[in-house]
Image (spheres, helix red, strand yellow):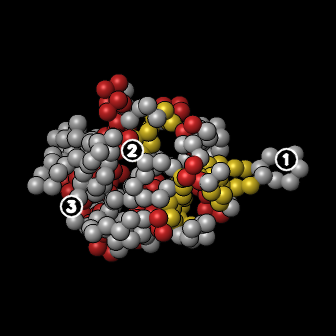
Amino acid sequence: MPPDERPPASRRLSGWRPGQGDLEELAALLATAPLTVEGRLPWSSNLSLLVTVGEPLPGDEPGTEVHAVYKPGRGERPLWDFPDGLYRREVAAAALSDALGWGLVPPTVLRHDGPLGSGSVQLFVEADYEQHYFTLVEAGGHDEVLRAICAFDVVANNADRKSGHVLLGTGGRLWAIDHGLCFHEEPKLRTVVWDFAGDPVPAHLLADLAALVDGVPPALTRLLGRAECDAVARRAARLVETGCFPEPVGDRPPYPWPLI
C-alpha cells in the first residue's frame, strides 16, 4: 500500500509507553538503527512520516523496534520568516528540554541518513488523542507540567503551540511535540497556553532556567545560529528577572491557528 493511502498511525500502530525501554537507550536507538517508512502522518503542514526504527533479529529472537516520527528537510514548505531546516529546531527543543531536566519533549535526534535525507527522528509515544491542552486544563491536575510547558515555550519562543501539541501519554505523562517554529531571535510567541499569564513562575523552574543565563548548552549551539542561542539566554534571563509568566504584548496575534 502506498504510504499516503495507509490509515493514520493512531488507528494501526502503538507508540512507546512506560515499561517499553529506557528513554536514553531509545534515543541511542533512534540515532543509529535503520529507518523503515511505514506511511505519511495526516494533517501535518510539512511532511511527517511514521517510521519503524530498528529491525528484527534472525530466528525467533525478538529485535528492538520502536516507532518514530521522521521529519525530513526535503518535505518542508519554505517560510518567509524561518530559514530552511526546521527539523533542526525539533532536535534543539528536545535538547533544551533535556538540559533543563524537564523531560517535556520525546527523545528526538538528528539523522542525515534517513530515507529522504537529513531530518529529525522523534520517538512516537502512545497517547490519548482525544485529550489536548484545553481538555487537560479543564480536567485539572496537570498544572505543574503545564506551567513547565508554558515556561519552555517562552524561552524557546514557540511560534506555534497549538492545543493538540500537548499530548496525554499512558501513565498520565504529558508530552510536548511539534517544535519546528521555535528559537527565532525575534519575538514570535504564539501559544494557547495563556492561562498562567501574570502568575509567578515556580521557583524550581526559575532555578533551572538560571543555568541558561550565561549561555545555552553546546547541543543547542550545534543546531542553532549564534543570534538564536543568544536570544534563548536573554529570554531565560528575562523570565528569571521578572519571575512571572508574560502577558501577550504587541500587535502580533498571540494565538496560533488553528487553535487545536
Q: Which residue is mark 2?
A: 165
Q: Position of residue 63 (x, y in %)?
A: 77, 50
- Residue 11: quarter of image: top right
Can residue 260 be seen here?
yes
The residue that label 3 is drawn on is: 187
- Which residue is at 80% across, 46% downward? 62
List x then y, in percent, for residue 140: 34, 26
Among the 4 quarters of the image, the one containing residue 114: bottom right
Q: Is residue 219 left or right of residue 190?
A: right
Q: Is residue 194 left or right of residue 133?
A: left
Amino acid at dot 3: Pro
Residue type at the position of mark 2: His
Q: State the CA–CA distance, disc 3 to disc 2.
A: 20 Å
Horizontal and vertical percent position of residue 98: 46, 54
Q: Looking at the rendering, in which quadrant would you find the C terminus?
A: top left
Q: Which residue is mark 1?
A: 61
On screen, 4 above or below 73?
Answer: above
Q: Is residue 51 visible?
A: no
Give the CA separation, mark 1 to mark 3. 52 Å
Residue drawn at (74%, 55%) of the image? 55
Residue, far right: 59
- In the image, residue 187 sits, relative to residue 171, either above or below, namely below
SS label for mark 1: loop
Task: Pick the residue in front: 129 or 19.
Answer: 129
